Image: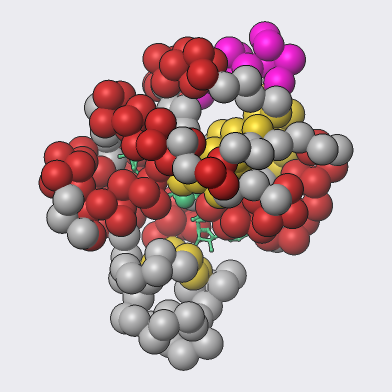
Amino acid sequence: MVHRVVFLGPPGAGKGTQAALIAKELGVPHLSTGDILRAAVGAKTPLGLQADGYMRAGGLVPDPLVLQILHERLDLPDARIGYLLDGFPRNLAQAEQLGTFSQVERVVSLEISPDLLVRRLSERRTCPKCQAVYNLSTKPPRVPGKCDLDGTALALRPDDQPEAISTRLKVYAEQTAPLLEYYRKRRLLRSVDASGTPSEVTAAIRKVLG
Ligand code: AP5
Ligand code: MG
């Protein structure tokens, strides 16, 4: 079984939803740079204060900051066996850096049409406390507006406003999509159709992970 896996995919493709399940199955930690950054923003740490503006606008946080958090996270004991990276790398420089300290075994590309993405993102609601993810039509919370896990009022992520969504899609196309070719050339890339139901997508990912 593979233990060093990267999920690539545009905003709203379902990376976080699928990574949470698949990481458990692989027995590796699910490392989302977006989740780590949002926790830092929420806690108003120096990193969070620096990252906040970039994230709200839908742009990328500068590489040195993201590389620092990735290094720190990969140094923790649970990441010794491997990782499932969600949201990293996001440009060629990050992919090159990752390659200098860890050998990725498989890259899964979640493929989906842009109109479905916008719908998923505008219907997403997240728990500001524990970051659990819901969807008004496909995964509603048990009590409307409240997190199933801790009862906190659910919110729209600041970068799920229409303007930030369109910036994120543009940033993905310009900076992240070139990684598909980068990993295809290295024979690590496997593509899955991410437009089906969550369980259909999970099954497709299991298949390409072998
Ligand atoms: P990040 O948090 O990584 O955001 P993203 O890549 O834009 O992806 P999302 O989290 O929005 O979508 P997802 O693919 O995880 O979808 P989800 O499973 O939630 O990054 C945020 C920001 O942080 C960046 O813009 C940047 O500023 C910064 N950042 C992070 N990493 C960085 C890096 N490496 N370098 C620089 N900056 C970085 O699903 C979406 C919705 O759809 C949910 O409501 C879900 O319930 C629903 N859904 C999921 N799957 C399905 C399905 N199959 N059918 C129906 N509904 C579904
Ligand atoms: Mg996510």
Q: On the picture, is 24 further left or further right than 71?
A: right
User: In x, y percent, where is residue 33?
Assistant: 41, 42
180 is within the stretch colored magenta: yes
Against 122, is 205 above or below?
Answer: above
Image quadrant holding the C terminus, namely top right
Q: Nearer the viewer, residue 113 or 79?
A: 79
Q: Nearer the viewer, residue 113 or 37?
A: 37
Against 169, is 101 above or below?
Answer: above
Against 188, is 130 above or below?
Answer: below
Image quadrant holding the N terminus, namely top right
User: In x, y percent, where is residue 202?
Assistant: 74, 53
Please identify the residue farthest to the front as the structure is shown: 77
The number of numbered discs placed on residues in the rendered structure image is 0
Residue at left offset 60%, top offset 56%: 20
Residue at left offset 41%, top offset 82%: 150
User: In x, y percent, where is residue 147?
Assistant: 43, 80
Magenta residues, start to end: 177-188
Please identify the residue farthest to the bottom as the structure is shown: 143
| Residue 10 visible | no
